[in-house]
Amino acid sequence: MSQYNQPRPQDPNAILNQCRDVDRGIDDVNRYVDQLSTLYRRLLSDVDPARENALREEVEDLANQTKRLYRNLVDRVKSIKQMPESGSPRNSSQVGKVERSLKAAITRYQQVQADFRKESESQMARQYRIVRPDATDAEVREAVQDSSNQQIFSQAVCLHRTSSPCVN
């Protein structure tokens, strides 16, 4: 009976198991980033405003999911690093690997976001020049920076391609 009163020995693989779980979460982040990249490509190629709005909502939801998961993983890595055993030779390399993988995943996410913004701005500039071929570079920059012009650009391109108004 006295054995039940003694503290249970801690799992010697606890940190490695937590690192494995964080690795799985990083895999999920990377899958989300792949999905975002695909959705961004669809957004850039779609001229139907109704589909565009649905895609934008899907992108926003997935981006928020990705950020939440990333923040959760950051917190978990911080927690792991605070454990005294995390610095042991047995665990430190795995903890470091997970931390580097997590940083690489968020860097990739940020790069996909930046690439989309750049391509989107470039596309809007081209569309603006179609609608206003006489626009100065400053006018184009100003129009591109005004995010409320997204819908106008989509409709203008649709008009240009089909010679008839697009349905919202």
Image (spheres, grey):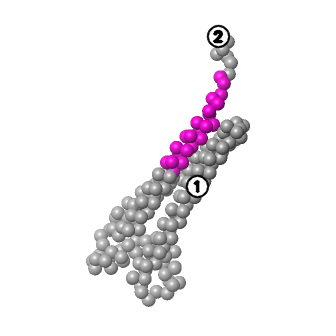
Q: Earlier in the sequence, mark 1 or mark 2?
A: 2
Q: Would residue 155 appear left or right of 25 to someone viewing this image?
A: left
Magenta region, residue range: 8-29
Q: Camera-side residue: 157 or 98?
A: 98
Check disc 2: other Cα within 10 Å, few if <14, some if 14-19, many if 20+: few
- The residue identified by callout 1 is 104
Residue placed at 62% from the left, 34% from the top? 14
The amino acid pointed to by label 2 is Met
- The residue identified by callout 2 is 1
The N terminus: image quadrant:
top right
Kindly report the secondary structure that dominates the magenta region of the rendered protein: helix
Q: Nearer the viewer, mark 1 or mark 2?
A: 1
Question: Where 68 sits versus 14, above or below?
Answer: below
Quarter of the rendering containing residue 42: bottom left
Residue 90 on image: x %, y %: 67, 37
Q: Check if residue 24 falls in the magenta segment.
A: yes
Please give the count of numbered marks on the rendered protein.
2
Q: Residue 96, can we see it? A: yes
SS of the residue at dot 2? loop
Quarter of the rendering containing residue 162: bottom left
Q: Camera-side residue: 94 or 132?
A: 94
The C terminus: image quadrant:
bottom left
The amino acid pointed to by label 1 is Ala
Residue 166 on image: x %, y %: 30, 72
Question: Where 120 sits versus 3, above or below?
Answer: below
Distance in Å between CA atoms under marks 1 and 2 = 51 Å
